[in-house]
Amino acid sequence: MSSSPLEETPTRPQQAAAREAQNSVGRSKGRNFEAEEGGMLCKAYLHFGKDAGTGTGQAAAKFWSRVAEYYNEHRPDGADREYNRNPRALACIRITATLFFSLRRARRSKSIRGKLQRWSLKLTELCYTIEHISGEDNVWVDMVSRWAGAVPPASDTIIKRWQLVVAPEPQQLRPLGPDSEWPDAQDIVSVQNNSKLPRPSQLTQDSEGGWRDAKNRFWLPPDADVLLFRLMVIAHCGTMDHRGMKEMINHLQEHFFIEKLESKVRDFSARYLLCCYVKGGNIIPRPWGETYRSKERNEALHMDYLFIGEYNDSKPYLLVLKDDFSHFCELIECSNADAATAAKAILDWNRRYGMPKLLVSNTAAHFKNQLLEELCHKTQMTQSFTLAYCPWINGSIERLNRDVLQVLRVMLLKYKVAQQNWTALVPLIQANINHSPVASLSNHSPAEVFAGAKATTSLQKRLVGKDTIAANVRETNAVT
């Protein structure tokens, strides 16, 4: 006796299709089917598995409604029975039933049956599970499978973008204007009292109400930008000759206690057009051997000729003399770069400061000659030469030459002096170099180390006052 379709055990493809259908319907309703529900779905199709289920029209609609009714009646207790009103669930049932019918029809065809058997044999070698991929996740694979034609190659597109940068508004500061007033000690005290920032604990108040540190330097509040800018102009421009950041820092640190001074000075120098124009490179090659260094003043003297330019009624050369220990220098204008001028300059140096023990120069004909050799022999002075075409070996004098050219360019542009009249600025350049503090000298000036003379700077004049300086000069003259 043949068993009824409802009592037949579903085959493997039918069980797989049932699991696929139960997962699909379970996802549409927010829950998973149990195994008993999947088997009930298979039995519902087997019970009504007629060819009418694959057709269209009223017969097909009647067939699928009967499948849904049978399924709802034979579902386990407690399950949701709203598939008659749920088109999505009915669609899943129809897909499952159609899959079963397709497999049954494929078994009737010998050609298709052979392919299915070969595929099933290949699949039995693998351990696999059937998983459902939702349409949202499988949309790109489905779209690519339906597209036709070659995809055009992608081409790079260059997009030009213009960025507008608003230039900072320059500060209107006219030092040489008739209404310009330079700051003094009273202005600094006023800025200190008006500042809302807390004062450092190590400050003490003087008799005039100003706040100073342990080194008797004025404290400058961090929010006093305008006052600091005016003080930087005094420490860098004018007779200070735009020497550079280190010199300006040394001048300011001598009289003021300023927080983060180095970064502020760097920002000031980067915005000053003259400094950006005349400043040279930062890399200087150094020799592989040891460089001679003096241990006392006037021990070694460096010499070099610096060519400025040929102008009418002007001397084209500048003879540069520099003490190795203190960096003290002298600048001498000369018409020719010859041995006689160098010998006369050495004798003038000896007349003022004494004869050095060592003379350092290059191997040019105006230094390496019989005249200077005889002069060094008579004065018991040793002559040392550097290699040709290696100016960085004598880096001390070459560094000074760069400073001289830098200051000279700035002063010619600032004071609008014709280039043929450059000799008139040589005394100012020499005074500025000799009286600027140097970091290698513990922030002392070359003139202070070499001769013990400390000059009055522009900042000191603003803090002390012109009247006090004049009174000190009159008092000194009266005593002498």
Image: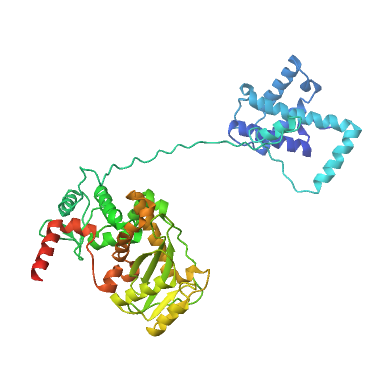
* Chosen colour scheme: rainbow
Which residue occupies the extreme right position in the image?
A: 110
- Work out whether residue 281 can be spotted: yes
Q: Position of residue 462 (x, y in %)?
A: 19, 55
Say which residue appears at 80% left-offset and 45% top-offset. 123
**Which residue shows up at 27% across the image and 61% down it?**
253
- Quarter of the image holding residue 203? bottom left
Would you place residue 373 above or below residue 117 in this image? below
Q: Looking at this rendering, what residue extends furthest in the front direction?
A: 313
Q: Residue furthest top?
A: 58
Q: Position of residue 180 (x, y in %)?
A: 21, 45
Look at the picture and state if 193 lies above or below 97.
Answer: below
Picture quarter with the C terminus:
bottom left
Query: Going by the image, does 166 lie left or right of 465?
Result: right
- Residue name at image x 47 percent, y 79 percent: 370
Q: Is residue 138 left or right of residue 345?
A: right
Q: Toward the viewer: 356 or 391?
A: 356
